[in-house]
Structure formats: structure tokens, C-alpha cells
Image (cartoon, rainbow, N blue to C red):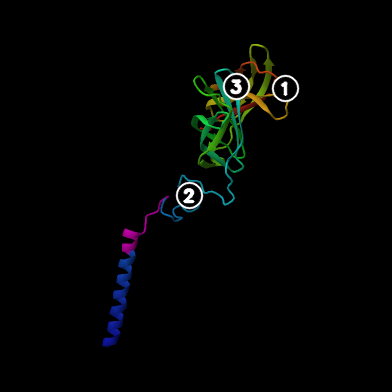
């Protein structure tokens, strides 16, 4: 082998060794390891840093925000108000496991009198109601409520589907003492629920206009169990008892 050939062979081998060392150094010191925050799709991720082993759900390009459809305030007693918020999740295949919200209670001049914060949930494609009951002693008269929603923690529908809890029966009675909704619900699901809230929304003669809300909570509703409930509200003038709406809410474990 002549001198030139030897130099070419040795030089090529030297460059190959340098390339291997540089590649090793890159992976060892510069390129981040597989994970859910490295800006790459790796491991068994379904997208970039989402899905699979990552807790974040891969969100579709046509994702639509959860919206507040209505917000109402009622005064069942002189020192108490009730707020009823109607929200909608237009995404049929995505649920919100956690959804923060803020309610601003305002006087007639739209000045915020009190603020209430909380966290709820909403299933895929669901229309949901939130209710709050506030002692107004020492507060200015509350005339309206404003609801604001925070950033939801999204979940796939398969991982957070709506419970199979059904309303079996219900009756509404109203007199000078109280308005009462009584009935029975049944858990047709395969899991137990720590609590199930039964909400009654009352309506008057005006179509679609709610005039009051109340609710009760049933603890430890077992799989396959049926349970009686009763929702009590102070007497409501102008109620149409045939229009009472009963809504059941339970968070999937």
C-alpha cells in the first residue's frame, strides 16, 4: 500500500471515529431523553408530548371551548340568593375532568359584591348546570351573576364517560310552606359513586325561563343501587310544577 492510500485510509477511519464520538456526545449531553416535555414525539406518545404514556390528551385541531350559555340569580329568601349557571361542552369526544370557574355576584350597577371560585367537571357533549347558594347578610342586593371558566383538564371520552344514572320517577308539589320534588334514581353503571347530586330547576309560565333552583346530595350510591331523593325549596310564586327539570350529576371515579 503506497503512502497516499495509507493516508486516505487512516484519515477516513479518523473522521469516522470523530463522528461517532460527536454523535455520542450529542445524545449524552445535548439531546433530551424521551419524556413528555421535550418537544418531540417519542416513546409511545400519540402526538408531541401528549397521549400514550403522557397524561396530557392530544387535542384535535377542531377543539371548541366550553361555553357559558346562561347565568341567573334568584332570591328564595330575603337573606339568601341562588345562582344557576348553564354551561355546554360542544366536544362530543372530549370531557373535562377538572374545570375551574369563577362566579362574580353583582349589584344593580354591575359592581362585584362577592366572588366565588370552584372546580367542576363536564362530560363529552354535555349541557351541565352549576348552582351556588349564598347568604347575603351584610351584602348589597345582588342583581346578577357573571360566570367565567378557566382552562379545562381534558380527558378522552373512554376514560371519563358520563355515568349511567337514570331518573326513575319524580313528582313536584307546591304549597304555601314549601316546594318539594321527590323521586327515585337508579345507578345502572358498573361502579359506585361517592356522591350523586340531584338538582331541581323550577320554571314559571314563561317558556324557558327558570325561576328557582335547589338540590340534594346522595352519598355512596352503589353500583346497581336505586335510591329515593327529596329536593326542598321555599315556596315559589307562579311555579308551573309540570315543567320542573331534574338533573343528576356524579363524578366518575
Residue 241 vs residue 253, the one in the foreground: 241
Observer-side mark, 1 or 2, equals 1
Q: In this view, does 183 lie to the left or right of 105?
A: right
Q: Position of residue 49 (x, y in %)?
A: 45, 51
Query: Going from the N terminus, do you reach mark 1 or mark 2 first?
Result: 2
- Mark 3–mark 1 CB contact (< 8 Å): no
Q: Which residue is drawn at 28% across and 79% down?
A: 10
Q: Residue furthest left?
A: 3
Question: Height in image: 35 above or below 149?
Answer: below
Work out how far the residue at label 3 is from the one at label 1, CA to CA, in angstroms.
22 Å
Look at the picture and state if 55 lies above or below 114.
below
In the image, residue 182 above or below residue 156:
above
- Which residue has dot 2 on it? 50
Judged by depth in the image, the label closer to the viewer, 3 or 1, is 3
Relative to 28, is 187 above or below?
A: above
Q: What stretch is highlighted in magenta?
A: 24-36
Sequence order check: which comes first, mark 3 or mark 1? 3
Disc 3: which residue: 75
Nearer-N-terminus badge (3/2): 2
Residue 241 placement: quadrant: top right
Circle 2 SS class: loop
Amino acid at each position: 500500500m503506497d503512502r497516499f492510500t495509507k493516508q486516505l485510509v487512516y484519515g477516513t477511519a479518523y473522521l469516522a471515529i470523530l463522528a461517532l464520538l460527536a454523535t455520542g456526545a450529542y445524545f449524552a449531553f445535548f439531546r433530551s431523553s424521551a419524556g413528555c416535555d421535550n418537544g418531540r414525539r417519542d416513546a409511545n406518545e400519540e402526538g408531541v408530548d401528549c397521549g400514550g404514556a403522557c397524561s396530557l390528551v392530544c387535542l384535535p385541531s377542531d377543539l371548541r371551548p366550553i361555553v357559558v350559555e346562561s347565568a341567573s340569580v334568584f332570591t328564595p329568601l330575603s337573606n339568601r340568593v341562588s345562582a344557576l349557571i348553564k354551561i355546554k361542552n360542544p366536544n362530543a369526544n372530549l370531557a373535562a375532568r377538572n374545570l375551574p370557574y369563577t362566579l362574580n355576584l353583582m349589584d344593580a350597577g354591575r359592581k362585584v359584591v362577592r366572588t366565588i371560585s370552584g372546580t367542576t367537571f363536564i362530560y363529552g357533549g354535555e349541557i351541565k348546570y352549576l348552582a351556588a347558594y349564598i347568604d347575603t347578610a351584610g351584602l348589597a342586593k345582588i342583581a346578577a351573576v357573571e360566570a367565567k371558566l378557566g382552562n379545562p383538564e381534558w380527558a378522552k371520552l373512554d376514560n371519563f364517560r358520563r355515568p349511567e344514572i337514570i331518573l326513575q320517577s319524580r313528582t313536584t308539589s307546591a304549597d304555601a310552606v314549601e316546594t318539594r320534588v321527590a323521586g327515585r334514581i337508579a345507578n345502572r353503571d358498573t361502579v359506585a359513586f361517592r356522591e350523586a347530586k340531584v338538582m331541581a330547576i323550577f320554571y314559571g309560565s314563561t317558556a324557558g325561563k327558570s325561576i328557582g333552583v335547589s338540590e340534594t346530595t346522595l352519598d355512596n350510591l352503589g353500583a346497581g343501587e336505586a335510591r329515593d331523593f327529596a329536593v326542598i325549596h321555599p315556596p315559589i310564586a307562579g311555579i308551573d310544577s309540570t315543567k320542573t327539570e331534574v338533573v343528576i350529576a356524579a363524578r366518575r371515579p
